[in-house]
Image: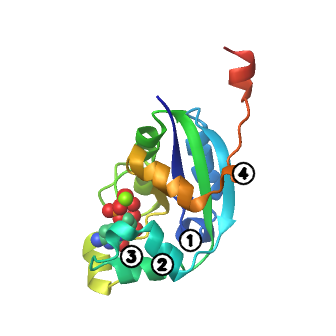
Amino acid sequence: MIEQTLVLIKPDGVERALVGEVLTRLERVGLKIVGMKMVLVDKNFARRHYAAHVEKGFYKGLEKFITSGPIVAIVLEGLHAVEQVRKIVGGTEPRTALPGTIRGDYAHHSYEYTDKKGIAIKNLVHASGSKKEAEEEITLWFSEKEIHSYQTVHEKHTF
Ligand code: CDP
Ligand code: MG
């Protein structure tokens, strides 16, 4: 049940100074940060991360967006971490993402607008969509040495 999942604060989230806000929302439910770094990715790396989307119409805009500035990459650990993080992050399209979610509260892009403009949906955060995706993405973004094992105060003093 204890899983690890990958979260990326995309260039729009970093540029809008929402790193702290995003981390607060993820940490406060009890998820543990076990890896974190700031990275600027190139086109080749973007293609590996978004391999499932390379053939899609929106990929060109997505590649331009994801390589446009630094990203904060985080590995979070906790019970049902993949599902929990997706719940906190919200739906892909900010227009329809529920209020209370990161994408619903801090962004408002719509498919209608971005498809017309040929740009990516700026939705602040990436979160692994399944356990399998999480395992592949963590291996892509982090070396074993960059993933840390430690006890939180709750683990140390509560249980
Ligand atoms: O990020 P998520 O797993 O919610 O969505 P996805 O379907 O895996 O798409 C990956 C990313 O591509 C999205 O988060 C958007 O930033 C972008 N995208 C887009 O720009 N235009 C679309 N029509 C669909 C996705
Ligand atoms: Mg996805």
Disc 1 and disc 4 in contact, CB within 8 angstroms:
no
Vertical side of 14 occupied by 29: above or below: above
Residue 43 in view, yes or no: yes
Name which quarter of the figure residue 116 lies in: bottom left
Dot 4 or dot 2: first in sequence order is 2
Dot 2 or dot 1: first in sequence order is 1
x, y (%) of residue 75? Answer: 59, 49
Left or right: 59 as drawn, with respect to 82: left
Left or right: 88 as drawn, with respect to 24: left
In the image, which disc is placed on residue 120?
3
Disc 2 and disc 3 in contact, CB within 8 angstroms:
yes
In the image, which disc is placed on residue 65?
2
x, y (%) of residue 104? Answer: 40, 54
| Residue bearing the label numbered 4 | 145
**SS under mark 3:** loop
Q: Is mark 2 within 8 Å of ligand 1?
A: yes
Q: Is mark 3 within 8 Å of ligand 1?
A: yes
**SS under mark 4:** helix
User: Is 44 in front, or is 107?
Assistant: 44
Disc 2 residue type (three-letter): Phe
Q: CA distance from mark 2 to mark 1?
A: 7 Å
In the image, which disc is placed on residue 11?
1
